[in-house]
Image (tube, grey):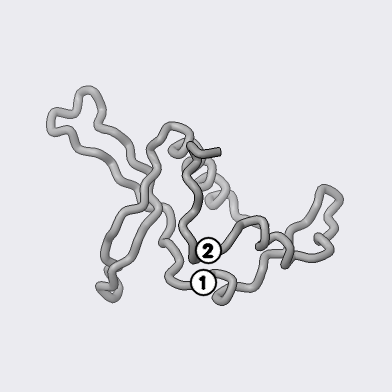
């Protein structure tokens, strides 16, 4: 079961994407100083914000490497609670994670 806070964060990401306020930004991980890329919601400055500061909220660290080699495939359950027959088929529809994804505007 996915925790409620994860679902809430995902819904926030969807809203940011719908508004065009989603970005990947470069940062440094505090624990080890490693350069990382973060999926962030970007909130534009409020109208009464004199300095024009954007609020950048990180939600996820992008995976460094091939996720198909790093993680076991998730087991997706259908509406009746049965696991799909071949969970490996789901990865085929996502495409190659090492290739750039197509631009949304092209579809």
Residue 50: x %, y % from top left: 13, 28
Q: Earlier along the polypeptide chain: callout 1 or callout 2?
A: 1
Residue 13: x %, y % from top left: 47, 43
Residue 57: x %, y % from top left: 34, 47
Q: Residue furthest left?
A: 51
Answer with the quarter of the image where residue 38 lies.
bottom left
Residue 74: x %, y % from top left: 67, 65
Q: Which residue is drawn at 59% across and 59% down?
A: 95
**Within 10 Å of the Cα at label 1, are there few (<14), some (14-19), or many (20+) other Cα atoms?**
few
Classify 9 as above or below 20: below
Q: Residue furthest front?
A: 106
Quadrant showing the N terminus: bottom right
Q: Residue at x 46, y 57 (%)?
A: 100
- The residue nearer to you, when weighing 74 against 104, is 104
Q: Residue at x 13, y 33 (%)?
A: 51
- The residue nearer to you, when weighing 18 against 6, is 18
Q: Which mark is residue 100?
A: none
Secondary structure type for disc 2: loop
All told, the count of numbered labels is 2
Classify 47 as above or below 5: above
Mark 1 and mark 2: span between their CA atoms? Answer: 6 Å
The residue under label 1 is: 66
The residue under label 2 is: 97
**Within 10 Å of the Cα at label 2, are there few (<14), some (14-19), or many (20+) other Cα atoms?**
few
Q: Which residue is drawn at 42% across and 53% down?
A: 59
Secondary structure type for disc 1: loop
- The residue nearer to you, when weighing 71 against 46, is 71
Do labels 1 and 2 touch, CB within 8 Å? yes
Q: Which residue lies furthest to the top in this view?
A: 47
């Amino acid at each position: 079961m996915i925790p409620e806070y994860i679902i809430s964060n995902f819904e926030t990401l969807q809203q940011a994407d719908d508004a065009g306020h989603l970005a990947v930004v470069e940062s440094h991980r505090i624990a080890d100083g490693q350069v990382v890329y973060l999926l962030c919601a970007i909130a534009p400055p409020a109208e009464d914000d004199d300095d024009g500061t954007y609020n950048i909220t990180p939600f996820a660290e992008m995976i460094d490497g091939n996720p198909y080699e790093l993680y076991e495939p998730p087991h997706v359950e259908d509406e009746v609670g049965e696991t799909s027959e071949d969970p490996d088929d789901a990865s085929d529809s996502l495409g190659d994670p090492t290739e750039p994804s197509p631009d949304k505007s092209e579809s």
